[in-house]
Amino acid sequence: MSGAIRRLINLDEVGSTNTAALEAARSGDPGTLWVTAARQIAGRGRRGRAWISERGNLYASLLLIDSVPLDQVGNLPLVVSLGVRNGLACLLAQDSERVQVKWPNDVLIGGGKAVGILLESERLADGRQAIVVGCGVNVAHVPLDAPYKVTSLVREGATADLDVVFDKVAAGVEQALEIFDRGRGFMRLRQQWLEKAVGIGEACRINLPHETLFGKFEGLDDTGRLVLRTESGVKVISAGDLFFFEHCMNGNTQEAEPR
Ligand code: BTN
């Protein structure tokens, strides 16, 4: 994507930029299209949760068409979160090491969640595969009721306006996708992701749809799945909600602040 002119639809108010991007795909858009909005009235988060989307934060979705082989789609959360992380690190140049990734696809600043990423995909009627990468960045506001630590760019001292934040985030994601190269560059990105990740080697809890696992976050396998050492052996996990604790092993939870 480097050197190419970025295709962008800039909306004021929308239900969800992810939905708008998918609608563009259904209408025949060729992809590599960004959709942004100043406000979402039906913003979506992971696991069916709502993403409160008032004016002042960034809501941006990238539509990709047939650009990621199906067996590589599972690696996209890591690729995209690293790209967003690298983009935001440019805005916090003095403090860029405080910008980290958290499995599977959050971006934290100083341990507080500053970004949520939601990937959605659809096989279109004409057979093309659409993937939408939706990014919500806390620029001016943080959610009031989050069950984990949250932060925003303003709180962390970044002064860039929304256009600049979008430009950095988009450039970071585009660069990561270019290195990803339909999966061929994944191992390089995986290594960079590990260098920027929170919590490797720490005790954690992972909430899955039908069970909760406790153990130690050992790292990632070659396909980007989380490797968890539990008392009953090693498990690899593709998706879930990850929380860290100061001391927690197999239910023996002395919960510190989950993050
Ligand atoms: C999460 O739950 O952490 C993911 C939140 C993803 C929110 C973004 S905002 C832009 C895009 N449009 C949506 O409706 N959701 C994503």
Image (tube, rainbow, N blue to C red):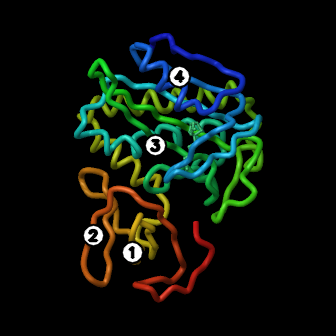
Q: Residue furthest bottom?
A: 252
Query: Where is residue 3, by image quadrant?
Result: top left
Pointer 4 residue Cβ closer than 8 Å to ligand 1: no
In the rendered image, the vertical position of residue 132 relative to residue 214, given as above or below: above
Q: Secondary structure at mark 2?
A: strand
Q: Splitting the image into 4 quarters, where does residue 139 fall? A: top right
Return the residue at label 1. 213
- The residue that label 4 is drawn on is 34
What amino acid is found at the position of numbered circle 3 in the picture?
Leu
Residue appearing at x 43%, y 38% in the figure: 120
- Estimate the spatial distance between the alpha carbons at disc 1 and disc 2, rounded to whole Å: 9 Å
Q: Residues within 10 Å of mark 1 (few under 14, many from 20)?
A: some
* Dot 1 or dot 4, earlier in sequence: 4
Residue 236: quadrant of the picture: bottom left
Q: Which residue is mark 3?
A: 82
Instruction: Please tell me which residue is depicted at 73% across the width and 32% down the height of the picture.
Output: 160
Label 2 to label 4: alpha-carbon separation: 36 Å
The amino acid beneath tag 2 is: Lys
Q: Are marks 1 and 2 in contact (CB under 8 Å)?
A: yes
Give the numbered dot on residue 235: 2
Q: Nearer the viewer, residue 186 or 27?
A: 27
Check contact, mark 1 vs mark 4: CB within 8 A: no
The mark closer to the camera, 1 or 3, is: 1
Q: Give the mark, 1 or 2, whose residue is nearer the N terminus.
A: 1
Is residue 41 left or right of 75 when viewed as pictured?
Answer: right
Q: Residue furthest front?
A: 125
Q: What's under tag 1, amino acid-wise?
A: Leu
Looking at the picture, does residue 46 appear above or below residue 175? below
Question: First in sequence: mark 2 or mark 4?
Answer: 4
Secondary structure beneath label 3: helix
Which class describes the residues within 10 Å of circle 2: few (<14), some (14-19), or many (20+)? Answer: few
